[in-house]
Amino acid sequence: MRSILGTAIFIFILCGPSFAEEIVQVDNQYVQEYKGRLGAWTEVKSQAQLNSLVGKFGTTIQEVREMNGSQLAFGSFLFMPFSDKYLQELEAQGVKRDSVVSRKNDFIWPISRVDNISSAFGMRHGRLHTGTDMPAVRGTPIIAVMDGRVVATGNDAGLGKNILLEHRDNFFTRYAHCYRWLVKTGDYVKKGQIIGLVGSTGRSTGCHLHFEIRYNDIPLNPLDFLPYKQNLSQPHMIRNWK
Ligand SMILES: [Zn+2]
């Protein structure tokens, strides 16, 4: 009897935390996280603009260099950290990150507001379409669906600018046709953290995110893993590959 109880407790300790729901902070266009700091990715075009943003956000050039590398490339996106005071001002105006309830080992959606799938996972024109296509306007934040590490950022003819993340237990996720990626190979990312912006690079006919979940490099149907969304219009339930 005692050993059964012990086994039960052991299983609970092993599995309990993964069943527990937690509140996950999700980046939006206003407040974002990078390397443990809150701020915002901003396209910075000149030294004058940088100086003005540093003043506005209550940060310093030194801090901006620490976040982005010592060579600040104007014309690209820089992560601008916010001071505590600026964050408090935003919060007083009701501006803060979004939040979702999720269990530790569950995925969240890579785009916060998806009400349409433009192309489902499955056979398409005689080939396997290895992901789920989610239309979104250019510049929409793309979110890491689970804690992980950036394996690669690439730019190729088909997928355009794309990001590959590695997660627990040999799960990988890929985010393709990005307008920009905002993380580097080797970065650790948290569930809910912005990693890129939606675009239409590569072989793409309009702005959308092509999102893949792979297990040991086998592409799986993302809709079998993402939280159920009631408002999602078809082809959500088309499982023509089965
Ligand atoms: Zn696709």
Image: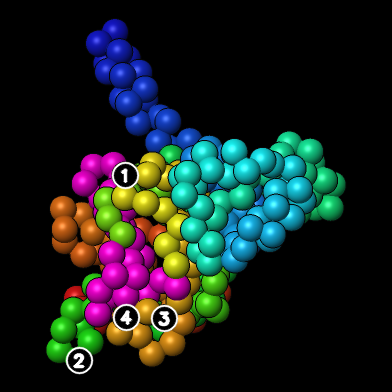
Helix, strand or loop status at disc 1: loop
Q: Is residue 228 visible?
A: no
In the picture, the disc for residue 202 is 4
Q: Secondary structure at mark 3?
A: loop
Q: CA distance from mark 2 to mark 4?
A: 18 Å
Q: Front-most of 177 and 98?
A: 177
- The numbered disc on residue 125 is 2
Mark 3 lies on residue = 200
Q: Are marks 3 and 2 in contact (CB under 8 Å)?
A: no
Along the polypeptide, which appears first: circle 2 or circle 4? 2
Q: Mark 1: which amino acid?
A: Gly
Residue 209 in percent (x, y) is at: 41, 73
Which of 74 and 84 lies nearest the eye of the viewer?
74
The dot on residue 83 is none
Q: What kind of colouring is applied to the model shown?
A: rainbow
**Mark 4 and mark 1 residues within 8 Å of each other at the beta carbon:** no
SS label for mark 4: loop
Tell me the amino acid under the disc marked 4: Gly
Which residue is labeled 1 in the image?
Answer: 186
Asked if the residue at tag 4 contacts the one at tag 2, i.e. Cβ–Cβ closer than 8 Å, the answer is no
- Amino acid type at image mark 3: Ser
Measured in 3D between alpha carbons, the distance from the residue under mark 3 to the one under mark 1, in whole angstroms, is 25 Å
Q: Which residues are magenta?
A: 154-179
The amino acid type of the residue labelled 2 equals: His
Look at the picture and state if 167 lies above or below 113: above
Label 2 CB-ligand 1 distance < 8 A: no
Asked if marks 3 and 1 touch (Cβ < 8 Å), the reply is no
Q: CA distance from mark 3 to mark 2?
A: 20 Å
Residue 142 image position (x, y, % from top left): 48, 63
Q: Which comes before the other along the chain, label 3 or label 1? A: 1
Q: Is residue 88 left or right of residue 15?
A: right
